[in-house]
Image: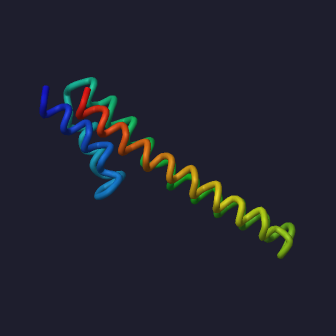
């Protein structure tokens, strides 16, 4: 059980060293259902910052094509919002990794 707790927390802490790869490997290799659950949650939380950047890039592309230079304020606001969301997700991963180790 101790190894499962360590692997579960490493899935969250992998945001530092292998955000997509480590949780996917653990998900497909692990047999314990709780470990699979943690690896799936960690994977989706690692995907979220990537998706916010993709969505922001698409929105900025269409906004500049439609509104020209007047859309720069909205784009800067979008980058600030994406930074805040990504920071929250990063901190959430660290907190979840610590919670798994403690609990």
Residue sitting at x 37%, y 36%: 40
Within the image, what quadrant is residue 10 found in?
top left
Q: Quadrant of the N terminus?
A: top left
Q: Where residue 24 sits: x, y (%)?
A: 31, 44
Answer left or right for 89 relative to 22. Answer: right
Question: Residue lying farthest bottom?
Answer: 69
Q: Where residue 42 sits: x, y (%)?
A: 37, 40
Answer left or right for 98 relative to 59. Answer: left
Q: Where residue 4 sits: x, y (%)?
A: 18, 31
Residue sitting at x 29%, y 31%: 36
How is the protein colored in the picture? rainbow
Residue sitting at x 25%, y 36%: 8
Total numbered labels: 0
Q: In which quarter of the image is the C terminus?
A: top left
Question: Residue lying farthest front?
Answer: 102
Q: Where residue 94 sits: x, y (%)?
A: 36, 45
Answer left or right for 18 relative to 5. Answer: right
Within the image, what quadrant is residue 12 found in?
top left
Residue sitting at x 72%, y 67%: 61
In the image, is residue 64 above or below residue 103?
below
> For this rendering, which residue is in front, 72 or 50?
72
> For this rendering, which residue is in front, 58 or 17?
17
Answer left or right for 50 relative to 67. Answer: left
């Amino acid at each position: 059980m101790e190894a499962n707790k360590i692997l579960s927390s490493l899935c969250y802490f992998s945001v530092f060293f292998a955000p997509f790869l480590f949780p996917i490997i653990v998900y497909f290799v692990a047999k314990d259902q709780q470990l699979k659950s943690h690896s799936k949650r960690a994977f989706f939380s690692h995907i979220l910052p990537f998706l916010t950047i993709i969505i922001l890039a698409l929105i900025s592309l269409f906004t500049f094509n439609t509104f020209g230079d007047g859309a720069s304020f909205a784009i800067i606001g979008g980058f600030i919002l994406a930074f805040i969301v990504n920071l929250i997700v990063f901190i959430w991963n660290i907190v979840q990794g610590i919670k798994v180790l403690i609990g």
